[in-house]
Amino acid sequence: MTDSLLVLALTAAACALPGVFLLLRNLSMIADAISHTVLFGIVLAFFLTHDLSSPWLLGGAALMGVLTVLLVELLGRTKTLKIDDAIGIIFPMLFSLAVILISKYAGNVHLDTDMVLMGEVIYAGLDTVPFFGFDIAAAALKMGAILLLNFTFITLFYKELKLSTFDEENARLIGMATSVIFYGLMTLISLTTVAAFDAVGSILVISFFIAPAGAALLFTKRLHHALFFAVLTGVINSGIGYALAIHFNASMSGMCAFVNMLVYIFAVLFHPKGVLTKRLQQTRNRERLRQELFIIHLGTHTARHRYSAENEVAEIAAHLRWSQTEMEKVSADLRAADMITQAGAYYLLTEKGQLRYQALRAEYFL
């Protein structure tokens, strides 16, 4: 079972790295397209080699991924279609051709479209290879090599990737081969996608490309931080999905994709500018303002008379025009913070409250 976890973690990390650049380039749907159309490349390579273990299958898939991007780009440049529309035309066409060829000419061959889509990483430990004296899952070794390849490419061409991603026009003007960088990235994505096919399936590959990178980019605007957090998020999500799949006896690939979705939704809601983050901040601001108003009210009237009628416990809510519930909440919070105390029928500021009152006077020029 640990082989499955290792495969999931390596796949998540391998996909997360290029996934950051896909999102920054607004090409997230390209990952979906490539993850389906590479099947056509696998089928064509199989018809040429008649060997499911042939390395040419990986090459055919990678070339088909690049061809997909090229066709989408060509359609997009005609100005008659948007990029998303072009993707919606190209990838169903190429994917359907792959399905037709499999069903028509490869019915007796173990090239199952359902497993390509859904995958089942739990079987990864059944296919092992010796590695430095240990038997390791072949899928783990393959994804480890892809992760190393992706990491090396991004490290070597980090500046070029960064500039061409954020300012492609300037990169082109200074003579940078932006097209080479772009298609090199697309080739890596194609290789990553097909390498993960037989282990996790294309659905989870898409999820690993998009969700961890999307969550990371919500919390940081620095590229190197985003790459690190995307990998970390993908690996953690894999561990959570693996544990939940074992507990509920469910599909590991499906559970990991589900966890990716939940984590991304959580990130959308709670990132620094998220909906719930803003709501919580507004709530905290309202509570702080009520407390400050209460302290200013007590300090102002105490300065005139220590036991002012405006500071009576039974009357202060009416003076501040608050409900009794609001009054009880604010007074309880201030007592817990040692800002106020109750002396008989009156609220009074503590020594700490007096210092806070003086600070508020200076802040608001009272």
Image (cartoon, rainbow, N blue to C red):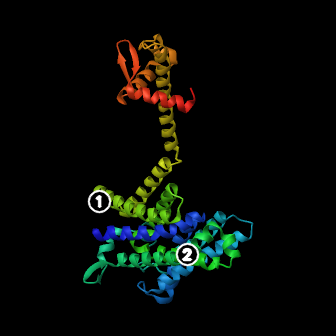
Badge 2 marks a residue whose secondary structure is helix
Q: Which mark is residue 136?
A: none
Residue topped by disc 2: 185
- Residue 120 in the image: above or below residue 41: above
Quadrant location of the N terminus? bottom left
Quarter of the image where the C terminus is located: top right
Residue 111 visible at all: no
| Residue 162 in sight | yes
Looking at the rendered structure, the number of numbered marks drawn on it comes to: 2
Q: Nearer the viewer, residue 247 or 364?
A: 364
Question: x and y percent of residue 107 in the render?
Answer: 45, 78
Residue position for label 1: 246
Residue at 35% from the left image edge and 15% from the top image edge: 343
| Image location of residue 174, percent across then percent down | 68, 76
Of residues 223 and 33, the one nearer the viewer is 223
The residue at 49%/75% (across/down) is 155
Residue at the outermost right position:
79
Choose between 269 and 7: the one closer to the eye: 269
Q: Are marks 2 and 1 in contact (CB under 8 Å)?
A: no
Q: Tag 2: residue type?
A: Leu
Residue at x-position 53% and y-position 62%: 222
Q: Residue furthest left?
A: 133
Question: Disc 2 vs disc 1: which is toward the camera?
Answer: 2
Q: Nearer the viewer, residue 349 or 92?
A: 349
Q: Position of residue 46 (x, y in %)?
A: 48, 84
- Tell me: 318 left or right of 77: left
Q: Secondary structure at mark 1?
A: helix
Q: Residue furthest bottom?
A: 49
Dot 2 or dot 1: first in sequence order is 2
Height in image: 326 above or below 44? Answer: above
**How far is disc 2 from disc 1 in space, using C-alphas?**
35 Å
Of the residues shown, which amino acid type is indicated by label 1?
Ile
